[in-house]
Image (cartoon, rainbow, N blue to C red):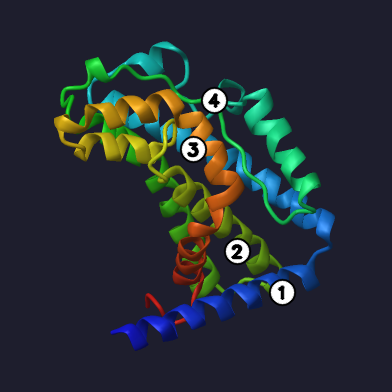
Amino acid sequence: MSRAWAVSRRRVVVMMRIFEYHISTTFDKSMQQLFFYLVLIPSAIIHEYMHGYVAESLGDPTARRAGRLTLDPRAHIDLWGTILLPLMLIVATGGAFAFGYAKPVPYNPNNLRDRRWGPMYVGLAGPLSNLVLAFIFGLIIRYVGVPASVGSLLAIIVYVNVLLAVFNLVPIPPLDGSKVLFAILPDSLWRLRQYLEQYGMYLLIIFMLFFFSLITPIISFLFGLFVGGGLLF
């Protein structure tokens, strides 16, 4: 089992290196950064929309009443998270890393029919929507005869959505993964929940600065899973 995992992991690494090489030789750096940014915005908007959609389906109309149950970018764009932050990260890292977010869609957990598991379902909706997008575009790359240049751009779409999904599933507030964690935590650990809610933003900054590398193998594995390498089909 461990040997099979090692072989699969090496195959994913090879796929990632091929992806990086092909992108770098097909498009110049500025083109890559621009497309990455243009993909990030709608992917984050779909992510937030799905939070509101699932909350609505579970009985909470807050997002709809706030005018956020829409795919209109104007309702979701945040000056800092959607525009300034990703642009600053792209420039600061030379395009090596970028991240952004849309305005969080509001919801009231007290309105949900299932108050125990409902928040978890709402939290999972965003990352799952990104994984579905990555899966769909991965299928196009693998089974539709698109030119290599188009395939490279589609691979960026896959990568961005995998990045959004995995990062948001980190169990630190205010990320979506915290909703999953809080749903499964026993009531006896209420102090831990209180601590995470109080210091979540500080913990998130520390994670991004020093521990982000912990999730890069997961991102790489899922990327290889979706775009090819004999790991899924």
| 202 versus 65 height, above or below | below
Q: Which residue is mark 4?
A: 103
Q: CA distance from mark 4 to mark 1?
A: 34 Å
Which quadrant would residue 42 be assigned to in this image?
top right
Whether pointer 1 and pointer 2 mark residues with C-beta atoms closer than 8 Å, the reply is yes
Question: From mark 1 to mark 2, how far is it between C-alphas?
Answer: 10 Å
Q: Residue at x 63, y 68 (%)?
A: 151
Tag of residue 22: 1
Q: Which residue is mark 3?
A: 46
Quarter where residue 168 is shown: top left
Closer to viewer: mark 2 or mark 4 = 4
User: Which quarter of the image is occupied by the C terminus?
Assistant: bottom left
Tell me the amino acid under the disc marked 4.
Lys
Outermost residue, top direction? 65
Q: CA distance from mark 4 to mark 3?
A: 11 Å
Residue type at mark 2 is: Ala
User: Mark 2 — residue?
Assistant: 155
Disc 3: CA contacts within 10 A as few (<14), some (14-19) or many (>=20)? many
195 left or right of 205 in image:
left
The answer to whether the residue labelled 2 contacts the one labelled 4, judged by CB atoms less than 8 Å apart, is no
Task: Specify the quadrant that holds the N terminus.
Answer: bottom left
Front residue of 100/188: it is: 188
Q: Secondary structure at mark 3?
A: helix
